[in-house]
Image (cartoon, rainbow, N blue to C red):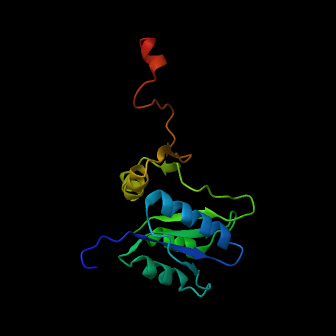
Amino acid sequence: MEGAHLMPEILAFTGGPADESVIRAVTTALAKTLHFTGGQQHSLPAGDGKGSAAVLLAMEEPSVGLAVLPYHPGDADRLISEVIRHCSKPVVLTPVNNAVTAHELISRVLVPLDGTAESAETVAETVALFAASGADIIALHVFALTTVPQCWYPVAPSRQISDMGF
């Protein structure tokens, strides 16, 4: 139907059979929360050095809104790193292990920021998507050892501090 507004699709990638149920559950929760189309699961390309290019190319499709990729804690995967660095759309990394379960809907999103304009710009679209769904957005200011200030006060003083006259 010409001119019809289509819901964005979620691309879900798995690294193997062990990832499938967790990736499917997270993709379903994201689709319900954001009102996106659940999309099909795809296998991550083999580690031939061109896998990230294939994933990035798939992500450039206009119908794609975001991707779900498996993350194995303790495993620094080059393909995943390349996709995160170069993808122009949101990527949801999903820890894959036996203890991970997904809820039916996503009600809370943690957004780590390092205080730079670049980090805020990078997550702005994703935060807007989740905020529109009604999810609670929790922003966490993350410091590196070299950037942590000697003293840091909140932007708005707490009620208790205000009442004390500070």
Q: Is residue 157 above or below residue 91?
A: above
Is there any visible trace of residue 85 in the rendered image? yes
Residue depicted at 38% across the width and 75% down the height: 63
Residue depicted at 38% across the width and 56% down the height: 118
Image position, residue 145 (x, y; %):
56, 46
Q: Is residue 105 above or below residue 139?
A: below
- Give the farthest residue toward the right: 98
- Give the farthest residue toward the front: 1
- Give the farthest residue toward the top: 164
Q: Is residue 33 above or below residue 37?
A: above
Residue depicted at 44% across the width and 59% down the height: 34
Q: Quadrant of residue 97?
A: bottom right
- Closer-to-camera residue (135/96): 135
Position of the N terminus by quadrant: bottom left
- Residue 61 left/right relative to 26: left
Total marks shown come to 0
Is there any visible trace of residue 71 in the rendered image? no
- Closer-to-camera residue (10/74): 10
- Residue 153 left/right relative to 70: left
Q: Quadrant of residue 9?
A: bottom left
Image position, residue 24 (x, y; %):
60, 69
Q: Is residue 134 above or below residue 12?
A: above
Image position, residue 51 (x, y; %):
54, 83
- Residue 68 left/right relative to 73: left
Image position, residue 132 (x, y; %):
38, 51
Position of the C terminus by quadrant: top left
